[in-house]
Each structure stands twice: as structure tokens, then as C-alpha cells.
Image: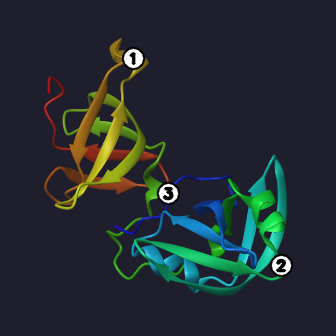
Amino acid sequence: MSQTQKPASDDHVVLGKLTSPYGVKGWLKVYSYTSPMQGILDYDAWMLRHDGKLRSYRLAQGRPHGKGLVALLDGVEGREQAEALAGAEILLPKTALPELDDADDFYWHQLIGLKVVTLDGIVLGHVDNLFETGANDVLVVKGSPQQGDESRERLLPYLYGDVVREVDLDAGVMTVDWDPEF
């Protein structure tokens, strides 16, 4: 499963965010949602969403720095301009994402929102988000109003073929082998 985080809209996905200026020459610290982290630097055309506005930038340079990343965008020439972009989300058109090699591979944004149903047809809720644990990715499934447990949250390991039996993106359904009582 390939990681890109939040769906931004029907056309874009959020790849990361700009967190704060780095230095005085316009560089910014980048928090990447991609796996591997440096994957965000493979895209040279970034759409930034900040204060409800969208604006395109070209990635001039980017590199790992410490445990994170830093980037310089064309047209951002000093610390003040970088500060003005701090907090911006980095968007990418979904059409720019590479095709996945395996039919059983999915981007995270494709899984968020899917209805989660057991093999017996019991609705557990929907995929609210995902996170990494090191051993495997984990699905956060929010409860179902039909079951009267909309406040319930389940953590299911994303183990395709074992726990996750089928993903039907067209139908918006993920079928899992999971005890609804757990």
C-alpha cells in the first residue's frame, strides 16, 4: 500500500505541508506524508493551499535535512516570504500520482471513506484515516450509525489477504475478516 495522506478534493491529494522557515534565504521545512518521505521531492510542480487559497509553485530545490526535509520554491526569496507560506498544504493532482504496479495496492487517499463490512455483511463503519506502526499500516474505522456505535473506533491491521479481504473502490466498500465485537 502506498502512502499519501488526506484527500484534498476530488482532484487533488495532500502530500505534505510546509511547517516553518529554514534559514534566511527562503527555504522551508517540509512535513511529508509520502512513503518514503523523500517521495514528495519527486514532484516539481506543487500546488499550495494556504488560508483557503490555491497557488502553484515550482520546486527549485529540495533535500533531506536532519530527520526531515527542506525545500526552496521558485519565487520565495527570503525568510519573510517563507514565513508567509508556513502552514500551507502541498497538493498534487491525483492524475500526477504514478500508477501502482499491483492491482491489490492502493493509495491511502483511495481507502479513506470506504465503508467497512465484515465477511458476514455487518457494517463496522468507514475508514477515517490510516497510520504506520512499523510492522504494518493500521486502518482507523469509525463506527456505523446503522449499528448504533457511531462513537466507536476500531483499529484494524491493514493486512491484505488476511484481515482485508477485498477492496472495491467502485462500490466504495472494503470487506474485512474481523470480529465485530472486537
- Residue shown at 38%/23% (left/top)? 144
Task: Give the position of the C terminus as an image quadrant.
Answer: top left
In front: label 2 or label 3:
2
The kind of residue tagged 2 is Glu
* Disc 2 to disc 1, C-alpha distance: 54 Å
The kind of residue tagged 3 is Gln
In this view, the residue in front, 32 or 26, is: 26
* Dot placed on the residue nearer the N-terminal end, 2 or 1: 2
Where is residue 89? Give x, y as percent: 67, 57
In this view, the residue in front, 32 or 173, is: 32
Looking at the rendered structure, the secondary structure element under dot 3 is loop
Which dot marks residue 77? Answer: 2
Quarter location, residue 162: bottom left
Quarter location, residue 106: bottom left
* Disc 1 to disc 3, C-alpha distance: 27 Å
Which dot marks residue 154? Answer: none
Residue 161 horizontal side relative to residue 107, left or right: left
In this view, the residue in front, 159 or 51, is: 51
Looking at the rendered structure, the secondary structure element under dot 2 is loop
Looking at the rendered structure, the secondary structure element under dot 1 is helix
In this view, the residue in front, 125 or 175, is: 125
Quarter location, residue 42: bottom right
Task: Give the position of the N terminus as an image quadrant.
Answer: bottom left
Q: Is 68 situated above or below 150?
A: below
- The residue labelled by disc 3 is 5
Where is residue 130? Give x, y as percent: 37, 49
- Neighbor class of circle 1 (other Cα within 10 Å; few <14, some 14-19, many 20+) is few
- The residue labelled by disc 1 is 146
